[in-house]
Amino acid sequence: MKHLLQNIKIGVNEKTFVKDPESSDLGKRIIENSIMMIHELGFEHFTFKKVGAKIGSNESSVYRYFENKHKLLLYLTSWYWGWLEYQLVFTTNSISDSQEKLKSAIKVLTQTVSLDASFSHINEVMLNEIVINEYSKSYLTKEVDEENKEGYFEIYKRLIIRMVEMIIAVDPDYPYPHSLSSTVLEGSLHQYFLKEHFPSLTDCDQHISPTQYLTHLVFNSLNTGDNG
Amino acid sequence: MKHLLQNIKIGVNEKTFVKDPESSDLGKRIIENSIMMIHELGFEHFTFKKVGAKIGSNESSVYRYFENKHKLLLYLTSWYWGWLEYQLVFTTNSISDSQEKLKSAIKVLTQTVSLDASFSHINEVMLNEIVINEYSKSYLTKEVDEENKEGYFEIYKRLIIRMVEMIIAVDPDYPYPHSLSSTVLEGSLHQYFLKEHFPSLTDCDQHISPTQYLTHLVFNSLNTGDNG
DNA sequence: AGAATATGATAGTAATACTATTATATTTGT
DNA sequence: ACAAATATAATAGTATTACTATCATATTCT
């Protein structure tokens, strides 16, 4: 993915951080190495002490950027969804045919991720795998309603609503556009997870992609106005 | 739900516990109160010390039944899936029409849960809510492959495969029966969660149920052989 | 050069997730 | 009925986590 615009910054809710990690070298190294370590150890085994040690700094310096690792996860996943949203808008903007538009949207949101050179300290491939393995943990908490009110899930919600609008454009009479849209995004993460860990529970493999499955699912649910 | 058979015991992988909690009064009180506390506090804030205190016992006694809270979660969720599997088999067994059978299966697996008097120490309504909020955490771990090998997710997998077979019976040519089946089960939990915490991301509310949405989703994906 | 700011080092606290040991009940076998 | 076995309770202790606080040092900004 190449950007026509240089120096794009993905906007993340400022409450996720104490000090913007993009504003300093140390901040960027925290992000870069946190992604590597969460990817490697999993969120449960990841600690600020460990990243601190890895970047030749220490715990207290990491705490100056993020309140706790939950907020860091919110930061990373919000960044990811913001990055995907950018690609979604960019890719689908010029498409006038509503079916083609929705098809492209599903593709962008469910296909495998590749590196984006514009953000050198962020490994989008690893981040995508973090989202697959850890995103649910960011909202499956007792604090979800409070954090939702504070806007921590705005980008994710906006992304889903964008697809809702595309679904409605294809079939204004379809009764479940919100559920379908949320199912595509969540279902995509889930199918990638199953492919890796529970292959007997998915048809996705080298030959069948989550994108194919979900595109089929969506277009069979919608009345496209075709006769074929 | 009433059982024709008395004294049914839901079979759970014995590796989930050190000592079978069904085998003693203390064990049952641990289960009963753990369900209440996980439901109330959420899995992260739940500890063995807290249940111990609640039942007038202590930490060390709880540890004699479960290695750790992760294993307890595996026990509780396996029990839940086993209980659902029983209802699934019982309900669908006598139905010969494959479409009706699948329709019933989706209903059993996605409808709201009500109390089952056969298991007095287990509150199935609370347990269902625990599954909605916490089940993902049982497999979104670095240990998932190991634990899968040891059979901790057998019942869940069997449940999905049962629905896979029903999907194939309706439409043998449908290319994604495994993905569709896993999407229904996971999607159901997700829609219930959204309904509660992110109502703008779902169409499910007092009037529309996850069952309706998912039934529509499945039957529009399948070629039922009808002309209508 | 001095002030402000960022980072690093160290220490300390409360809670968690256990393990180990010993004491005290309760149950069971003869 | 009594000894032996088993289950439970009570207490203590350890390593790690998830922080907070303080102070020293380095960097940069004016």
Image: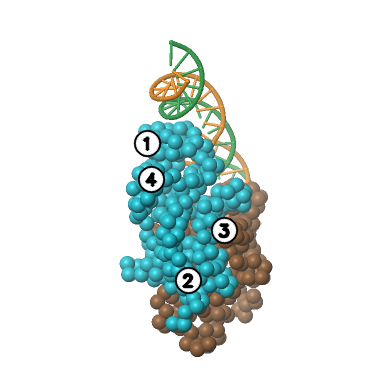
Chain colours: A cyan, B brown, C green, D orange
Q: What is the chain letter for disc 3?
A: B
Nearer-the-camera pick, B142 or B62: B142
In the rendered image, residue A105, in percent from the top left (x then y), is placed at: 44, 63
Along the line of sight, the residue nearer the viewer: A178 or A196: A178
**Is circle 2 on the same chain as circle 3?**
no
First in residue order: circle 4 vs circle 1:
4
Residue A55, disc:
1
Disc on the earlier residue, 2 or 4: 4
Callout 3, which amino acid?
Asn
- The residue carrying pointer 1 sits among few (fewer than 14), some (14 to 19) or many (20 or more) residues within 10 Å by Cα, namely some
Query: In front of the other: label 1 or label 2?
Result: 2
Could you classify mark 4 by the number of other residues whose Cα lies within 10 Å: few (under 14), some (14-19), or many (20 or more)? few
The residue where tag 2 is placed is A218
In the image, what residue occupies the spot 53% across and 72% down?
A: A171
Residue A113's mark? none
For marks 4 and 1, give the one nearer the viewer.
Answer: 4
Q: Secondary structure at mark 4?
A: loop
Give the residue at x 61% y 57%.
B197
Which of discs 2 and 3 lies nearer the camera? The answer is: 2
C-alpha gap between disc 2 and disc 4: 35 Å
Q: Are marks 2 and 4 on the same chain?
A: yes
* Spatial CA span between label 2 and label 3: 26 Å
Residues marked 3 and 4, same chain? no
Q: Are marks 4 and 1 in contact (CB under 8 Å)?
A: no
Task: Identify the chain of the residue marked 4, using the numbered disc in the image.
Answer: A
| Type of the residue with mark 2 | Val
Disc 4 designates what residue?
A6
SS for callout 3 = helix
Numbered mark located on residue B133 in the image = 3
